[in-house]
Image (cartoon, rainbow, N blue to C red):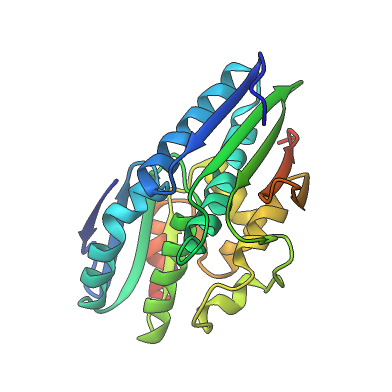
């Protein structure tokens, strides 16, 4: 991932304080670039879920680092996340209705529901460099 | 992030959450809040008036609280959800799990049945 003008590049440690700081930086960057608050909000929400997926699968022999790249244009946000963990496609988990979560002992499928419901496009690829890459687009939604 | 437990009526516990419910914020309060809620009885009202952001860990925490209430046969409702947070909850169908009331009084009426 190459930093460029008008783009934000963040390398983050896989812990919660680093994630929270990255969320705030992303939100501030996108707001300054003209993304509406609801786009910034959805980006912060989905990035939290994506990074938490990496943190949950980080031990043992999992990811040691992650990076986020963000750009914005015409109110749209483009965000890519890469991590050096084993191949994992968060878009392939089976979604489950949230109403079943009360009875369930786990939250399987919740993350996919969250990512799909709050992005306008999402793509996963395993790169030739051996990293997971998740690209996400967020478009303004009319109120 | 902080929380406070109040007893607005006998048999009802109001959980007032304050601050950004992002990963680090939720991590600060979740264990303590769950432990305190397990020791309480009665219905639960979650007050989100002072929560400007809620991430995926925050949503999972709300689901855990709803599970806790369901296990003891109690009702649960939310109030004071800010517009952007509410939009996400609607997208997630979270309101099917935890109904939202427009104000504190309506939330109390909702859990009172």
Q: Where residue B87 sits in the image (x, y, percent)?
A: 61, 47
Residue A79 against residue B31 in the figure, above or below: above
The quarter of the displayed image where residue B45 is located? bottom left
The quarter of the displayed image where residue A98 is located? bottom right
Please name the residue shown 67% across and 36% down the image.
Answer: A79
Q: Quadrant of the N terminus of chain A?
A: top right
* Closest to the observer, A84 or A29: A84
The quarter of the displayed image where residue A94 is located? bottom right
* Closest to the observer, A143 or A106: A106
* Closest to the observer, A97 or A68: A68
Q: Where residue A83 sits in the image (x, y, percent)?
A: 59, 48
Q: Where residue B43 sits in the image (x, y, percent)?
A: 33, 74
Please name the residue shown 29% across and 61% down the image.
Answer: B14
In the visual, does B30 lie left or right of B23? left
Q: Quadrant of the C terminus of chain A?
A: top right
Residue B33 against residue A43 in the figure, above or below: below
Residue A132 against residue B96 in the figure, above or below: above
Please name the residue shown 57% across and 45% down the image.
Answer: A47
**Which residue sits furthest front?**
A129
In the visual, does B69 lie left or right of B95? left
Q: Where residue B7 sits in the image (x, y, percent)?
A: 21, 64
Please name the residue shown 64% across and 30% down the image.
Answer: A70
Residue B18 against residue A116 in the figure, above or below: above
């Amino acid at each position: 991932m190459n930093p460029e003008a008008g783009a934000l590049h963040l390398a983050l440690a896989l812990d919660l304080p680093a994630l929270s700081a990255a969320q705030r930086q992303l939100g501030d960057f996108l707001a300054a670039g003209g993304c509406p608050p609801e786009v910034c909000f959805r980006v912060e929400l989905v990035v939290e879920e994506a990074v938490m997926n990496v943190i949950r699968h980080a031990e043992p022999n999992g990811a040691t680092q992650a990076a986020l790249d963000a750009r914005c244009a015409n109110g749209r946000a483009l965000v890519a996340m890469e991590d050096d963990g084993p191949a994992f496609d968060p878009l392939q988990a089976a979604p489950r209705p949230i109403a079943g979560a009360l009875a369930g002992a786990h939250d399987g499928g919740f993350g996919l529901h969250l990512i799909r419901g709050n992005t306008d496009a999402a793509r996963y690829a395993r790169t030739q460099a051996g990293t997971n890459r998740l690209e996400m687009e967020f478009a303004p939604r009319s109120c | 992030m902080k929380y406070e437990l109040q007893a607005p009526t006998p048999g009802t516990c109001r959980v007032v959450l304050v601050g950004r419910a992002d990963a680090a914020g939720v991590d600060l309060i979740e264990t303590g809040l769950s432990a305190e809620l397990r020791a309480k009885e009665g219905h639960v009202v979650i007050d989100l008036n002072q929560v400007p952001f809620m991430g995926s860990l925050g949503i999972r925490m709300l689901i855990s609280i709803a599970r806790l209430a369901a296990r003891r046969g109690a009702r649960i409702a939310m109030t004071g959800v800010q517009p952007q947070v509410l939009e996400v909850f609607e997208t997630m169908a979270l309101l099917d799990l935890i109904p939202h009331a427009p104000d504190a009084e309506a939330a109390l009426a909702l859990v009172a049945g």
